[in-house]
Image (cartoon, rainbow, N blue to C red):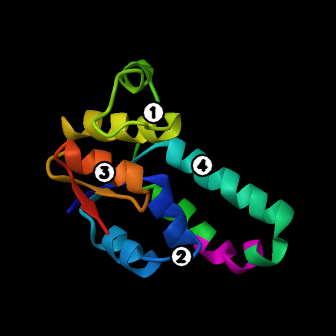
Amino acid sequence: MNIYLESSAALRDLLDGEHGPLIRERLRAADLVATSRLTLVEVGRVLARLRALEPQVAATVAAREAQFESDSELWVIHPVDDAIWARCGRPFPCEPVRTLDAVHLATLEQLSGAVEHLVMLSTDERVRANAKTLGFAVEP
């Protein structure tokens, strides 16, 4: 299975949120994991906030954070380039779409041209609805 990892799913995995174990299982079993550079930034910001505001929680996820960083070195990290920004400015099937969600959806669309059978891994309902309407399989 080829997976596009969206930030909400990455954070559920990292922070052991709802569906975290299933997301982790899908990532481990994937033939290919692709994501946007945005995912790494969003995850980094959440972890930085945790270290500043909830150091005890940050300490409990430190091992998962290290694993995420290690795993991400093996992933296809897609840049947020001019083509992605241009797509973000056009409508998506299920509006309204927030800007950062549009980046993920535009990246998914762009990657689907190069990666067959790309499955969106997301827990964000707006992202999931759009991905499904665009014809992508969505998990969990």
User: Residue 94: percent from the left, percent from the top?
Assistant: 32, 40
| Residue at left offset 14%, top offset 47% | 116
| Residue at left offset 34%, top offset 26% | 91
Reading the image, the residue beneath label 3 is 129
Q: Residues within 10 Å of mark 3 (few under 14, many from 20)?
A: some
Q: Earlier in the sequence, mark 1 or mark 4?
A: 4
| Circle 3/circle 4 CB separation < 8 Å | no
Q: What secondary structure is the magenta-colored segment mainly? A: helix
In the image, 42: left or right of 36? right
| Residue at left offset 21%, top offset 41% | 134
Q: Earlier in the sequence, mark 2 or mark 4?
A: 2
User: Circle 2 sits in a helix, a strand or a loop, which is it?
Assistant: loop
User: Circle 4 sits in a helix, a strand or a loop, which is it?
Assistant: helix
Q: Nearer the viewer, mark 1 or mark 2?
A: 2
Q: CA distance from mark 1 to mark 3?
A: 23 Å
Query: Is the residue 42 above or below the residue 56 in the image?
Result: above
Q: CA distance from mark 3 to mark 4?
A: 21 Å
Three-letter code, disc 4: Glu
The tag on residue 79 is 1
In the image, 119: left or right of 107? left
The tag on residue 42 is 4
Magenta span covers which residues? 58-64
User: Circle 1 sits in a helix, a strand or a loop, which is it?
Assistant: loop
Q: Is residue 60 magenta?
A: yes
Query: Is the residue 102 above or below the residue 44 in the image?
Result: above
